[in-house]
Image (cartoon, rainbow, N blue to C red):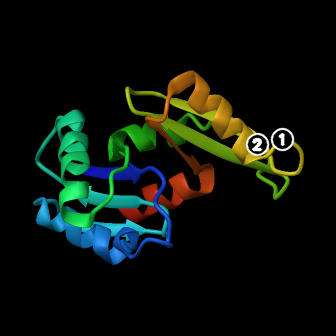
Amino acid sequence: MKYVAFIRGVGPENPNMHGDKLKWFFEKLGFKNVKSLLSSGNVIFESNEQDIKEIEKSVEKNLPKMLNFSRTTIVRSEIELKKMLDTNPFEGKQDLPASRFNVTFLKNGGEIFSVIDTVGTGTTKIMAELEKKYGKEITTRTWKTVEKVIKKMR
């Protein structure tokens, strides 16, 4: 099965968070055909393991041991992402620089779709509200990033 791991809070300031290190890490855990996408913690891989929670636990348990950082990791299957893409909640709307389409992935399943006014409200305020309601076991990606992930999975 093909999966993507969305790792929360990955940034280029930490050399252990770079794509090549994440690729190495996932390969060491036994995952196959590992690819890193962009520099924001998106890792595509294949696994025979079908229990997503077990994959998440393995990644979260081993990140501090092997790469010296801890982060929430949310895994989705290619099938789940394709289904989400097919139901496109943003259909008929325009993704513009002033209003970005976002998907917030919840650790315990499900997603929240939002259009963020980058000029007025801003991403930070929306994220703070989502964290207040759902805790820190969430991570957000732009709709364009999700489309890129699905394209690279194919």
Q: Which residue is at a point 49% across and 62% down the rendered structure image?
A: 40
In the picture of the structure, the residue carrying the numbered disc 1 is 121
Q: Position of residue 54 (x, y in %)?
A: 17, 37
Measure how far apart labels 1 and 2 are at the Cα level: 7 Å
Please, is residue 133 above or below residue 151 in the view?
A: above
Q: Position of residue 64 (x, y in %)?
A: 24, 56
Q: Is residue 124 left or right of residue 104?
A: right
In the picture of the structure, the residue carrying the numbered disc 2 is 116
Q: Position of residue 5 (x, y in %)?
A: 34, 51
Q: Can residue 94 be spotted in the picture?
A: yes
Ranked by sequence position, the earlier of labels 1 and 2 is 2
Mark 1 touching mark 2, by CB under 8 A?
Answer: yes
> Image quadrant of residue 45?
bottom left
Q: Position of residue 145 (x, y in %)?
A: 55, 57
Q: Which residue is at a point 76% across and 51% down the rendered structure image?
A: 95
- Under mark 2, the amino acid is Ile
